[in-house]
Each structure stands twice: as structure tokens, then as C-alpha cells.
């Protein structure tokens, strides 16, 4: 009865548009009152949820990404990638995908990746003859690479929620991230005949020859983009060599970004407060969701809901394959209706005990969970990536949807490969 009321309140508040953090807090508080639990537990839970060293990585990564974006280093990186992909037909689409993967190694945020790429490459693609709706769809889907390529904010959230190693989660998502990048590049390549005009600029974009003028600029572009290229190596190199924890690597990335854009005179000193403000707003919104969602999760734990779900799942099936099918269906639906980090915070503690009883590796399960929920970013009704891309590229969901499906179906296939081929995530063991 208590669980039913909590879920109903949660859904009603979400439908009414109440901020997600408040939704979790109110539904959890109602559950605590109904269960006659001490309210002191509720009051202390948000503090304990945020008093976590791994979570400090979130504001640092967001700050580094904001600094790189405002310093135009992302634009320089895009220009460099375009040079090296000049021989590919439809090169700007490939540039969007490869650059999104690089950008993911700086920000760890899907929506931030979409906004940056739509602003820097979107209009260029349209000018070259691509259909506007396709550009919006490609940009929206490329944002998923911002999470699949480490570092990843949802993976940090998952690690904090279940106690999994963030460093191992980052390592585990490298191959899936590369796999999804290749899948999207193939989809783009096969889509070219229908989405790119064969006249005028579109014909030039479709050419497979090098642009000699651009190619001659390669050394200069490489030098200008070097600071942006170095950043992922600082982050991932520091983590995987054991020199730094993910949080320390994130802090170094933020400090590095400040030094580079200030010394390089890419932004004025007086602009820094506004950059810090924007990064703080984004960070605070994520951390508020984490803090208030912890109330809901705490009540669920005290009511032994995860254990009940685990036992119920085992009574439904003793086959790990069937369990993962059920999990994928549940997570896919949840991702359609909830913000990514909130969905991770809700579902990870609930499904984790059942996954452990089926003998599924916690790192492998984390990649399955986050990848699945991330697909919700390109699946209505929530679909944050679609709405951000549509707004920036001046398109509409109706126009974009046929092209979104071109990427969504292969994405589901990629998800199934990750689910049933553990080696893709556990290759490093």
C-alpha cells in the first residue's frame, strides 16, 4: 500500500511538471510518514547522499566542459576533425559523430554535447545541403556518445548509488562507446543518398577527394586544437595509470581548462564569473536531484523494496537471459519518462540486488543500465536530446522522427550486444 501511494504521487507530480528533485522528496516524505519512520532519517539522508568524494567529479567535469565551450576550443577541435575526415563522403556528419565522442571525454554530459555540436556544426551541415530535420536528428543521437565515452556523469551517479568503482565503469564503457560511434557512422553513410542534396554545395560535401585548401591548414589547425586534444588524455590517462582518482582527474581538468583559456586569451578574466555561474547552475540541478532522490531511495530500502523485487524476479525466471530481457524493457520504459540521472538513481538500487543474485557483474550491469536509460534521451516523451537539438537546429519532432528511428533501431541492437556479450564491457579483466 505504501509503495503504491509513493509511486502514484511520484507519477502525478512528474505529470504536473513539479521539479524532479522535489518530486522525489515529497513522495519519499509521504512514504516515511505512512510507514511511521523517524523523520530525522529523511532530514539527514540528502546530506549523506552528497557527502561522497566521487560526486565531486560532476561539477569539475561540467566546469571543464563549459570552459572549453566558451573558449571556442570545441570549434577548433571540430575544424581539425573535419580535416582528417575530408576524404569521407558526407564528412560533416562524421565530424559531428567523432567530435561528439571527443567532447564526451571532456564533459561527460549528453545534453551538453548536443548543444555544443548543434551550435558549431548544425548550420554548416544545412548549408552544405543536408536536410534540416536530419541534421537535428543526427546531432540529437550523437549526444549519446557524450555519455558512452568516458568520463560519464550517469556512470558516476551509478557508482555512487551502488558502491561500484567509477574507474572500472569508465574503463568498461570505452569499447561500447567506440562501437556506438562506428554504428552511427555507418547509419550516416547509408543515409546520405536520401538526406543530402546532390546539387551545389551538397555535391561538394559528397565528394570523396581531399579539400587541398583545408588539408594545407592541417598543421595550423592541429596546433590550435592541441589544448582540447590533450584534455581527454589528462583525464583518462590520470585515472588509468593510477595517478589520480576520477574526482582528482576532474579537478585537474577544470584547473587545466582555466589556465589554457586564460593564458591563451580565449576569454577575458571578467567573463570567468559568468562561466563559473553557468557551470554551478547545471551542477546544482544535478546534485539536487541526487540529494532528494536519496530520500525516496532510502524509504524504498527501509521498506525492503529492492529485496522484494529481487525475490519476485527470481520467482518469475531463473534464467539470467530472461532476467536481462525484463530489465531492458523496464529500463527502456523508465528512460522514456524520466530524466537520466534521476532514472539511474531510482532504478540502480532497485535492480542491483536482483542482478547480483543472478550473478551478473556489477560493472557490466552498470553499463547495461546507463546505456538503456540513455536511449530515453532520443525516445519521446522526455527525449531531452531531441528537444535541445530541435530548438537549436530550428526543426520539429514530427520532421525529425523518421530520421531518429534510423539511429534508434541500430542503438537497440547495440544495447543487446552490450547486454549479451559481457566481453564488450569486461574485456579488461
Image (tube, rainbow, N blue to C red):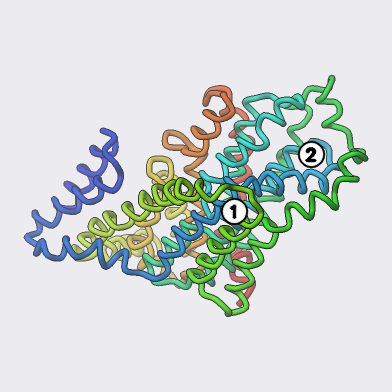
Q: Residue furthest left?
A: 36
Which sits in the foreground, 32 or 3? Answer: 32
Which sits in the foreground, 76 or 97? Answer: 76
Q: Image quarter for residue 191?
A: top right
- The spot of residue 267 in percent (x, y) is 59, 47
Q: Residue furthest top?
A: 199
| Secondary structure type for disc 2 | helix
Disc 1: which residue? 104
Task: Name the residue at 76% across, 36% down.
Answer: 190
- The spot of residue 243 in percent (x, y) is 58, 79
- The spot of residue 18 in percent (x, y) is 26, 38
Q: What number is the disc on residue 390?
A: none
Task: Name the residue at 50% across, 47% down.
Answer: 270
Q: Image quarter for residue 132?
A: top right
Q: Quadrant of the C terminus?
A: bottom right
Q: Is residue 154 above or below residue 428?
A: above
- The spot of residue 100 in percent (x, y) is 64, 47
Q: In the image, is 209 to the left or to the right of 13?
A: right
Which sits in the foreground, 253 or 135? Answer: 253
Q: What number is the disc on residue 91?
A: 2
- Which of the marked residues, 1 or 2, is nearer the chain's N terminus? 2
CA distance for labels 1 and 2: 20 Å
Task: Name the residue at 29% across, 35% down.
Answer: 17
Amino acid at each position: 500500500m505504501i509503495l503504491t501511494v509513493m509511486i502514484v504521487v511520484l507519477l502525478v507530480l512528474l505529470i504536473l511538471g513539479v521539479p524532479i528533485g522535489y518530486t522525489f522528496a515529497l513522495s519519499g516524505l509521504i512514504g516515511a510518514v505512512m510507514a511511521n519512520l523517524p523523520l530525522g532519517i529523511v532530514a539527514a539522508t540528502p546530506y549523506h547522499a552528497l557527502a561522497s568524494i566521487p560526486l565531486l567529479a560532476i561539477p569539475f567535469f561540467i566546469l571543464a566542459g563549459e570552459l572549453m565551450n566558451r573558449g571556442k576550443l570545441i570549434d577548433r577541435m571540430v575544424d581539425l576533425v573535419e580535416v582528417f575526415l575530408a576524404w569521407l563522403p558526407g564528412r560533416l556528419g562524421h565530424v559531428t559523430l567523432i567530435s561528439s565522442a571527443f567532447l564526451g571525454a571532456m564533459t561527460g554530459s549528453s545534453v551538453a554535447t548536443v548543444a555544443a555540436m548543434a551550435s558549431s556544426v548544425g548550420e554548416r551541415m544545412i548549408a552544405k545541403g543536408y536536410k534540416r530535420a536530419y541534421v537535428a536528428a543526427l546531432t540529437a543521437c550523437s549526444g549519446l556518445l557524450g555519455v558512452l565515452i568516458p568520463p560519464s556523469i550517469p556512470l558516476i551517479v551509478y557508482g555512487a548509488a551502488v558502491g561500484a568503482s567509477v574507474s572500472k565503469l569508465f574503463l568498461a564503457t570505452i569499447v561500447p562507446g567506440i562501437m556506438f560511434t562506428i554504428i552511427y557512422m555507418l547509419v550516416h553513410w547509408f543515409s546520405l543518398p536520401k538526406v543530402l542534396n546532390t546539387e551545389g554545395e551538397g555535391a561538394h560535401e559528397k565528394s570523396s577527394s581531399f579539400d587541398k585548401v583545408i588539408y594545407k591548414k592541417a598543421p595550423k589547425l592541429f596546433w590550435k586544437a592541441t589544448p582540447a586534444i590533450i584534455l581527454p588524455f589528462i583525464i583518462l590517462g590520470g585515472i588509468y595509470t593510477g595517478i589520480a582518482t576520477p574526482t582528482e582527474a576532474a579537478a585537474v581538468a577544470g584547473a587545466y581548462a582555466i589556465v589554457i583559456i586564460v593564458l591563451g586569451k580565449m576569454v577575458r578574466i571578467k567573463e570567468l564569473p559568468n562561466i563559473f555561474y553557468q557551470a554551478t547552475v547545471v551542477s546544482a540541478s544535478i546534485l539536487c536531484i541526487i540529494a532528494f532522490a536519496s530520500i525516496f531511495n532510502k524509504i524504498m530500502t527501509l521498506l525492503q523494496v529492492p529485496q522484494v523485487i529481487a525475490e519476485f524476479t527470481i520467482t518469475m525466471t531463473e534464467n539470467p537471459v530472461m532476467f536481462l530481457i525484463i530489465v531492458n524493457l523496464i529500463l527502456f520504459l523508465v528512460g522514456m519518462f524520466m530524466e537520466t540521472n534521476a532514472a539511474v538513481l531510482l532504478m540502480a538500487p532497485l535492480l542491483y540486488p536482483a542482478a547480483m543474485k543472478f550473478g551478473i557483474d556489477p560493472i557490466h550491469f552498470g553499463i547495461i543500465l546507463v546505456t538503456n536509460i540513455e536511449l530515453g534521451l532520443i525516445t519521446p516523451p522526455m527525449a531531452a536530446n531531441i528537444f535541445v537539438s530541435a530548438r537549436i537546429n530550428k526543426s520539429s519532432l514530427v520532421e525529425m522522427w523518421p530520421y531518429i528511428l534510423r539511429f534508434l533501431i541500430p542503438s537497440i541492437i547495440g544495447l543487446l550486444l552490450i547486454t549479451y556479450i559481457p566481453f564488450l564491457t569486461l574485456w579488461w579483466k
